[in-house]
Image (cartoon, rainbow, N blue to C red):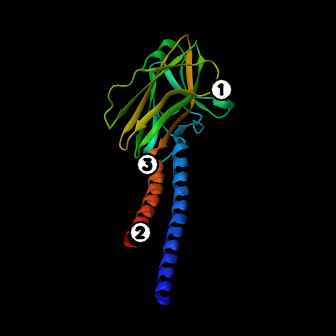
């Protein structure tokens, strides 16, 4: 009888120890899940690509300008700006850039300022291709007119898989003769899936003669969704595994 009592007591101690261990493990895993949920809810957009134009040389800028920095784990190849300057419109390095430092990219028309408002003569296209799902994608920039009267820029986009289709209805951003204290934000809340390309087309309207317009600090930001989903899933897997082990042990008892 003594041996049987000891055996029963030993089994009870093991059962209590097993449940205590499970509670500790579950508590740790719940903390892990809470941390994952916190990461998911507080995820912030990171910079995908930006152009500050500070590396522009003293000569005429090239018609194709690669991003100064970009996230190579999220976009395929180097995002680029392709600038059109034809007719009596030319590209130039403008100084000072936004924030009274560095350089900016300028379109200028020495005469016939209205040519700056012709897409065939003056415009640019931004292009990047995603290799991961990007949500809450936003575009910000700074700009001003360097000559002539008040100018406006018109921003439209197209999301495609290689062939550019119809661009969205243009968003108008009116510029002043000084750099803006707060960046302009023509687009936000866009989503790109892996393999999709974002093309952004920018055209101008011109007034006065001569006319000029400059852009600086073109920045594209987004939230890389797979990272956040992975955090949440790992936490749920931890808890699910612990619960499964607990009921498996109880079923055998």
Q: Is residue 233 above or below residue 10?
A: above
Q: In the image, what residue occupies the spot 37% across and 69% down? A: 251
Disc 2: CA contacts within 10 A as few (<14), some (14-19) or many (>=20):
few
Compared with 60, 174 (above or below) is above
Which of 181/27 is in front? Answer: 27
Q: Which residue is mark 3?
A: 226
Image point 35% across, 43% down: which residue? 195
| Closer to the eye: label 2 or 1 | 2
Residue bearing mark 2: 250
- Give percent across and percent down for residue 40: 51, 46
Local SS, label 1: loop
Reading the image, the residue beneath label 1 is 181
Q: Earlier in the sequence, mark 3 or mark 2?
A: 3
Q: Earlier in the sequence, mark 2 or mark 1?
A: 1
Residues under numbered marks 2 and 1 in contact, where contact means CB atoms less than 8 Å apart: no
> Which part of the image, by quadrant, shows the C terminus?
bottom left
Residue 155 spot, x, y in % from top left: 46, 24
Q: Classify mark 2: helix, strand or loop.
A: helix
Residue shown at the point (50%, 89%) measured from the top left:
2
Q: Quadrant of residue 190?
A: top left
How far apart are the two marked residues, 1 and 3, measured between alpha carbons? 34 Å
Left or right: where 30 falls relative to 176 = left
Q: CA distance from mark 2 to mark 1?
A: 64 Å
In this rendering, the label closer to the viewer, 1 or 3:
3
């Amino acid at each position: 009888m003594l041996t049987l009592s000891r055996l029963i007591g030993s089994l009870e101690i093991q059962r209590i120890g097993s449940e205590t261990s499970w509670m500790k493990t579950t508590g740790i895993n719940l903390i892990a899940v809470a941390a994952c949920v916190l990461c998911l809810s507080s995820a912030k957009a990171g910079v995908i690509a930006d152009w500050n134009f500070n590396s522009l040389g003293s000569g005429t800028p090239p018609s194709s300008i690669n991003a100064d920095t970009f996230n190579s784990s999220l976009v395929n190849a180097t995002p680029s700006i392709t600038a059109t300057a034809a007719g009596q419109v030319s590209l130039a390095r403008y100084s000072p850039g936004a924030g009274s430092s560095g350089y900016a990219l300028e379109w200028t028309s020495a005469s016939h300022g209205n040519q700056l408002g012709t897409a065939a003569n003056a415009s640019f296209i931004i292009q990047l291709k995603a290799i991961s799902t990007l949500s809450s994608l936003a575009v910000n920039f700074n700009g001003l007119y360097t000559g002539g009267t008040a100018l406006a820029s018109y921003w439209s986009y197209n999301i495609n898989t290689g062939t550019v289709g119809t661009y969205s209805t243009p968003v108008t951003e009116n510029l002043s003769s000084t750099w803006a204290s707060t960046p302009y934000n023509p687009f936000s809340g866009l989503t790109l899936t892996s393999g999709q390309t974002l093309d952004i087309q920018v055209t101008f309207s011109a007034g006065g003669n001569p006319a000029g317009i400059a852009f600086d600090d073109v920045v594209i930001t987004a939230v890389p969704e797979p990272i956040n989903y992975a955090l949440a899933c790992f936490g749920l897997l931890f808890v699910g595994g612990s619960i499964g082990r607990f009921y498996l042990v109880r079923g055998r008892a």
